[in-house]
Structures are given as C-alpha cells and as structure tokens.
C-alpha cells in the first residue's frame, strides 16, 4: 500500500519552466524553446533580475531598443525576443487561471 503522507501541494513553476511549457504546448521546436528561454533570461538580466511580472511596456521597449542600438540586431531577431517575452507573460496568465481551478 502506498503512503501519501509526503505528497506536497503543487508548486508554482518558475518563470523559465512556464516559458518552456508554453512553447511545448504550442508544439514549437526544441531550438525555439531554447532560444525563447535564452531571450527571457537576457531580458531579466538586462533589468537587474527583476521579474517580468513587475515590468511593463516601457521595460520591453527599453530592452528592444538596447538590442537594436547596442546589440545591432536585425528586426527578425527583435521580433523573436519580443515573442519570447510575451510568451512568458501569456503563459503566466494561462497558468494562473489553471492553477486557481477556473477555465
């Protein structure tokens, strides 16, 4: 007979786990998943390890401007970074709804 006294309540996945889950749910490739996680890490580190839930449009624009001006990246690269950042936000909202038991 199995013992269930060590079962813990489900924990909230961390930010990067939520990004990975969102990418997998959308059936994107492993390389895309890896790239999105890297972009979200860069975004968080650029803003001094602040959580994206505490940031808004101004911070996203500042990061994208930094990429364009200082990083000298092309528009498709900026688009991928933006998609990764917004994926983390969408996954947070979807996960919050699912974890609260609402649909």
Image (cartoon, rainbow, N blue to C red):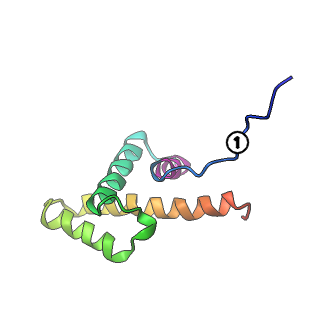
Q: In which quadrant of the rendered image does the C terminus lie?
A: bottom right
Q: Residue at x 19, y 61 (%)?
A: 74
Question: Does the magenta portion include 75?
Answer: no
**Residue 82: x %, y % from top left:** 34, 64
Left-right relation of 61 to 96: left
Left-right relation of 4 to 10: right
Left-right relation of 36 to 19: left
**Residue 29: x %, y % from top left:** 43, 43
Q: Residue at x 46, y 47 (%)?
A: 28
Magenta residues? Answer: 17-26
Furthest-top residue in this view: 1
Badge 1 marks a residue whose secondary structure is loop
Left-right relation of 11 to 40: right
Q: Quadrant of residue 80?
A: bottom left
The residue wearing badge 1 is: 8
**Residue 53: x %, y % from top left:** 46, 67
Furthest-front residue in this view: 5
Question: Does the magenta portion include 21?
Answer: yes
| Residue 72, above or below 58 | above
Q: Residue at x 29, y 61 (%)?
A: 48
Q: In which quadrant of the rendered image does the N terminus lie?
A: top right
């Amino acid at each position: 007979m199995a013992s269930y006294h060590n079962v813990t309540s489900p924990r909230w996945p961390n930010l990067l786990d939520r990004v990975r889950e969102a990418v997998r749910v959308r059936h994107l490739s492993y390389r895309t998943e890896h790239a999105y996680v890297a972009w979200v890490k860069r975004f968080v580190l650029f803003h001094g390890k602040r959580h994206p839930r505490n940031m808004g449009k101004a911070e996203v624009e500042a990061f994208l401007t930094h990429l364009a001006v200082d990083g000298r990246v092309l528009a498709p690269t900026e688009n991928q970074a933006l998609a990764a950042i917004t994926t983390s936000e969408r996954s947070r909202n979807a996960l919050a709804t699912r974890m609260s038991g609402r649909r």
